[in-house]
Amino acid sequence: MSNFELLGQWEITEAWLREASSWIVVNSDSAKNGLNNFKEYLSHNELELALDELAEVAMNFPQSHRFWDSMCQAAASMKLDERSNAFATQWAATRGV
């Protein structure tokens, strides 16, 4: 993969992560701290750590199916198939909610 292609893939992944973060329900200091950590990881182009941080916040507070869909897409974009499948399961579980 060329540097140009890699940069494009990072931008796609970052967009999915930002989309997911926009759906986070912030209802505690813990969630706020998690989002701050997420932003810090993004600023250093640590996309997998940013994904992990959002997943951690989501495990402590119920999130919408839109959040899980974005997380699934972000993980798939990074070729993290196992996590993408886990997020897809969460998406399916919350879709009717």
Image (spheres, rainbow, N blue to C red):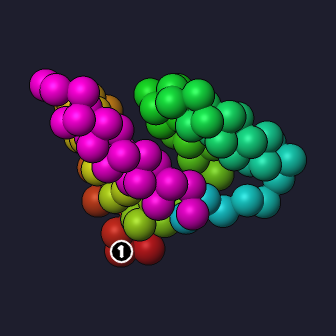
**Residue for point 74% across, 47% down:** 31
Q: Main secondary structure of the magenta part?
A: helix
Q: Percent from the top left, x then y, of residue 11? A: 36, 46
Farthest residue toward the right?
Answer: 29
Q: Does the magenta stretch include residue 6?
A: yes
Seen from the viewer's position, the closer of residues 61 and 9 is 9
Q: In which quarter of the image is the C terminus?
A: bottom left
- Tell me the element at label 1: loop
**Residue for point 44% across, 28% down:** 48
Q: For residue 75, what is the image quadrant?
A: top left
Location of residue 66 with respect to 86 vertically, above or below: below
**Residue for point 34% across, 69% down:** 95
Q: Does the magenta stretch include residue 13?
A: yes
**Residue for point 41% across, 54% down:** 15
Location of residue 95 with respect to 18 vertically, above or below: below
Q: In this rendering, does residue 60 appear at all? A: no
Q: For residue 39, what is the image quadrant?
A: top right
Q: Give the range drawn in magenta.
A: 1-22
Q: For residue 57, what is the image quadrant?
A: top right
Q: In this rendering, does residue 63 appear at all? A: yes
Mark count? 1
Q: Percent from the top left, x then y, of residue 19? A: 47, 60
* Residues packed near mark 1 inside 10 Å, few (<14), some (14 to 19) or many (20 plus): few
Q: In which quarter of the image is the N terminus?
A: top left
Q: Percent from the top left, x then y, of residue 9? A: 26, 40
Farthest residue toward the left?
Answer: 1
Image position of 63 (left or right of 77):
right
Name the residue tied to disc 1.
Answer: 96
Q: Percent from the top left, x then y, of residue 38? A: 63, 39
Seen from the viewer's position, the closer of residues 62 and 50 is 50
Farthest residue toward the bottom?
Answer: 96
Could you tell me the amino acid type at mark 1?
Gly
